[in-house]
């Protein structure tokens, strides 16, 4: 069991602009979950999709309404984002609460997004790496924390591969193949643009192990860049393709891998130690087509 540092989390919520009432309610929900986890001899940082369903069942037995459960799960999801743990609360949708579902995309649609990309930023260390990071979301199924952990030594342009380091205890490291156009783009970036923001500010060549320097040297920078990418995706493709955030690109890649290679190979490519993380894609039928809406999880 991982003890919760409520004081640090309270400070985090305050820094994020949550009002006093909102902070108190968020901590209250976290304490309820902690008590349930202890009672059921579970570990807070190891909760699975199935564990969350059990917790929802427990809340329902207490007479909690569906709309209230939705709010509670949202507050708990925030804590998992803060801890940068795998977040099982993101996988849950409550039946009976009408909500637009996220679309998953086909290979052709993913290719189109990459090919049509127009950089939204004029900031030096952002604009030269926007499409590279977008490509890692699309073709390697990476998430922001994977990007942060990438080092210059992890990319092998001769072999056309990139090593993805374990981002948390639930993921393994793995070596993934780059697309040919990614290899060429990375070569140009490393030779001509990597570290340019740092150099312009200091006049000194960047001395960093991070692949994306100075973007990933400080976490808030890469988070700001991801927000820019998300905003651009919404501006360009929300109406036509139903895209709201970059995580849909990663989820689409997982579904495509399962369809193309089977769930075991997809498990290696995604790095997940537990196959359960991928099984929900298989259960929903991995032959995803644009315009097909994900079903609500069967919560009575």
Image (cartoon, rainbow, N blue to C red):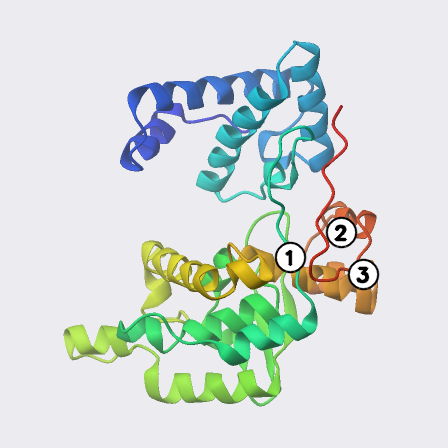
From this view, report whether residue 265 is shown above or below residue 73. below
From this view, report whether residue 35 is shown above or below residue 264. above
**Quadrant of the image containing the C terminus:** top right
Residue under label 3: 287
Rounded to the nearest angstrom, the CA distance separating label 1 from label 2 is 9 Å
Residue sitting at the far top: 62
From this view, report whether residue 278 is shown above or below residue 32. below
Numbered disc 1: secondary structure: helix
Numbered disc 3: secondary structure: loop
The reply to whether discs 1 and 2 touch (Cβ–Cβ < 8 Å) is: yes
Residue under label 2: 281
Q: Residue at x 40, y 84 (%)?
A: 190
The reply to whether discs 3 and 1 touch (Cβ–Cβ < 8 Å) is: no
The reply to whether discs 2 and 3 touch (Cβ–Cβ < 8 Å) is: no
Numbered disc 2: secondary structure: helix
Residue sitting at the far left: 202
Q: Could you tell whether 113 is left or right of 216 in the image? A: right
Q: Counting other residues with Cα less than 10 Å from the Cα at mark 2, is it few (<14), some (14-19), or many (20 or more)?
A: many
- The picture places residue 64, in percent across and down from the top left corner, at 62, 14
From this view, report whether residue 180 is shown above or below residue 40. below
Q: Residue at x 71, y 11 (%)?
A: 61
Label 3 vs 1, first from the N-terminus? 1
- The picture places residue 1, in percent across and down from the top left corner, at 58, 27
Residue under label 1: 251
The image quadrant of residue 60 is top right
Rounded to the nearest angstrom, the CA distance separating label 3 from label 1 is 13 Å
Closer-to-camera residue (156/32): 32
Q: Could you tell whether 34 is left or right of 201 in the image? A: right
Q: Residue at x 58, y 15 (%)?
A: 35
Closer-to-camera residue (67/141): 67
């Amino acid at each position: 069991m991982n003890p919760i540092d409520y004081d640090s989390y309270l400070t985090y919520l305050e820094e994020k602009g949550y009002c006093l009432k909102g902070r108190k309610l968020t901590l209250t929900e976290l304490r309820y979950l902690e008590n349930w986890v202890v009672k059921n001899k579970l570990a807070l940082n190891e909760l699975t999709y199935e564990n969350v369903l059990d917790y929802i069942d427990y809340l329902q037995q207490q007479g909690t309404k569906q709309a209230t459960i939705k709010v509670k799960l949202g507050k708990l999801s925030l804590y998992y984002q803060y801890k940068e743990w795998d977040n099982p609360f993101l996988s849950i949708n409550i039946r009976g609460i009408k909500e637009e579902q996220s679309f998953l995309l086909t290979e052709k649609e993913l290719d189109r997004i990459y090919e049509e990309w127009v950089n939204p930023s004029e900031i030096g260390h952002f604009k030269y790496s926007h499409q590279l990071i977008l490509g890692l979301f699309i073709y390697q199924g990476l998430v922001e924390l994977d990007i942060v952990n990438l080092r210059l030594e992890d990319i092998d342009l001769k072999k056309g591969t990139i090593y993805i380091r374990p981002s948390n205890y639930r993921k393994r490291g793995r070596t993934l193949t780059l697309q040919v156009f990614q290899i060429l783009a990375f070569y140009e970036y490393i030779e001509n643009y990597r570290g340019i923001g740092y150099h312009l500010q200091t006049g000194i060549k960047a001395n960093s192990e991070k692949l994306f320097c100075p973007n990933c040297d400080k976490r808030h920078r890469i988070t700001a860049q991801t927000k820019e990418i998300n905003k651009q995706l919404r501006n360009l493709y929300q109406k036509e393709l139903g895209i709201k955030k970059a995580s849909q690109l990663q989820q689409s890649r997982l579904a495509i891998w399962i369809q193309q290679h089977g769930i075991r190979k997809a498990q290696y490519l995604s790095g997940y130690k537990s196959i359960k993380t991928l099984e929900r894609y298989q259960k929903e039928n991995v032959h995803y087509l644009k315009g097909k809406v994900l079903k609500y999880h069967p919560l009575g």
